[in-house]
Amino acid sequence: MCGLLSRNTIIGFALFLSVPLFGFGCGNFDQGLGGGGADKSGSLFNVEYIDPTYFEDSTRQVDVFLNPNCSNDPDEPDPEPYSDHFADVTFTNRPLNNSLETPPTIYLYEYFVWYTPLTQGSPPLDSFTVMGVGDQGGIEGCDPGSQCAGETLSQIQFVPVREKEVLAGYILSTGIFQLEYNIHYRFFGRNVFGYEVSAEAITNFYASNYDNCGG
């Protein structure tokens, strides 16, 4: 259930996108984080789903060009909506296999983002760390044997404007109309007892000049 293609349309081209494959990150407790492993944290911490969003639309088409006027009236310019591209990320905090105890709540405190190009010759994008993960009350543990729908956090950085500018400059200089990248996440948190946990995930996006003028 990806629900990928947004209402965005690409300017000047008929665009057909295939449904992308998601790489979901499993909890990782042994990367020198001081957590001592899942047996001590009491949790299986995972990223279940990444849903890129742009002005309330679900889309992985990242608009890297700002249209200064959506209106046909030059005397009353109506700029295209333009900002950082964010994502909604769903996490689960599951009990250990065969455990009868609900795992303790996990509180995220930072995440690391990096990119790998899928279009040959695409420019490198800077990696970055985001300190603090918005207004979140923690990822509560799922009861043993439950469906464990998980909890979704919004406003996770996906492609900031500063990286959009790099992509736009490359597109203008080469004439390539669309680029594709993988985006990688590593989320860090700790539970109420102070044990460190982390989880990784990967998905993709497309970058071009998309029309967000709203018709």
Image (tube, rainbow, N blue to C red):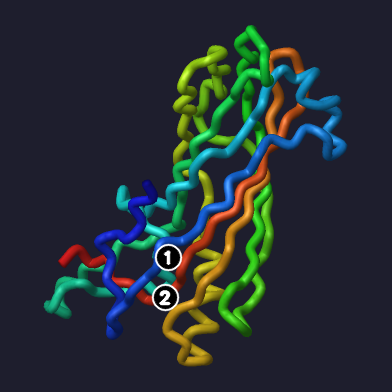
Nearest the viewer among 95 and 163 is 95
Q: Is residue 81 left or right of residue 40?
A: left
Circles 2 and 1: CB distance less than 8 Å? yes
Residue 112 image point, x, y percent: 68, 48
Count all numbered tags in the image, as a single digit.
2
Residue 49 image point, x, y percent: 49, 43
Up-down relation of residue 4 to residue 89 (above or below): below
Up-down relation of residue 9 to residue 141 (above or below): below
Judged from the image, the secondary structure of the residue bearing numbered disc 1 is strand
Residue farthest to the left, as pictured: 73
At label 2, which amino acid type do we have?
A: Ser
Task: Residue 154: tell me if it is visible.
Answer: yes
Judged from the image, the secondary structure of the residue bearing numbered disc 2 is strand
Q: What residue appears at the point 57 percent right and 17 percent down from the top-left corner?
A: 141
Residue farthest to the top, as pictured: 100
- Count residues near mark 2 (Cα–Cα under 10 Å), then give few for <14, some for 14-19, many for 20+: many
Q: What residue appears at the point 63 percent right and 55 percent down from the top-left corner?
A: 184
Task: Residue 187: tell me if it is visible.
Answer: no
Q: Is residue 63 left or right of residue 33?
A: left
Residue 177 image point, x, y percent: 42, 84
Q: Is residue 183 left or right of residue 81?
A: right
Up-down relation of residue 171 to residue 50 (above or below): below
Which comes before the other along the chain, label 2 or label 1? 1
Residue beneath disc 2:
208
Residue farthest to the bottom, as pictured: 174
